[in-house]
Amino acid sequence: QLVESGGGLVQAGGSLRLSCKAQRMITSTFNPTTMAWYRQAPGKQRELVASISSTKTTNYVDSVKGRFAISRDNARKTVYLQMDNLQFEDTGVYYCNTIARNLEWGQGTQVTVSG
């Protein structure tokens, strides 16, 4: 089970830090798995935003490069997404999953950027 948290309402230019805990993954499965954050804006398909491998290699969609930072804490089976200089276009529901999207999706966390 994936549990996302940390979303909220923020003004443009603000910051949020999202967390995702993979509650039911065992550590030996979580650690070698590339994890990712996705987002779904209203009326749009879910898109990949950022990923982080077991060796902590990161990748980002162009629109968030330089503003978002993905990280992971294997001991806590948790993935984070630090989002700075948020823009209106970042509004949406944020989800985490593996890069293969092979886990049941969690409820996501809503990020709303105003102004």
Image (cartoon, helix red, strand yellow):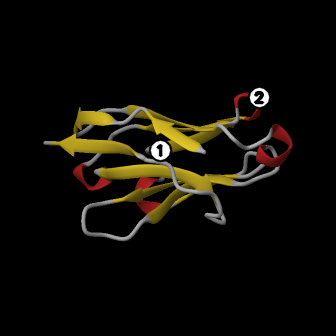
Say which label, 1 or 2, has the lower sequence index: 1
- In the image, 19 versus 29, the foreground residue is 29
Picture coordinates of residue 17, whole percent (x, y): 45, 32
64 relative position to 26: left or right: left
Local SS, label 1:
strand
Above-or-below relation of 27 to 94: above
Q: Which residue is mark 1?
A: 68
- Dividing the picture into quarters, in which one does residue 8 lie? top left
**Residue positioned 82% across, 50% down in the render:** 32
- Dividing the picture into quarters, in which one does residue 77 lie? top right
Pick the quarter of the image with the N terminus: top right
**Residue positioned 79% across, 41% down in the render:** 26
**Residue positioned 30% across, 60% down in the render:** 41
Q: Nearer the viewer, mark 1 or mark 2?
A: 2
Pick the quarter of the image with the C terminus: top left
Q: Which residue is mark 2?
A: 75
Above-or-below relation of 4 to 33: above
Please, what is the three-letter code of the amino acid marked with disc 1?
Phe
**Residue positioned 75% across, 34% down in the render:** 74
Picture coordinates of residue 63, whole percent (x, y): 40, 59
Q: CA distance from mark 1 to mark 2?
A: 22 Å
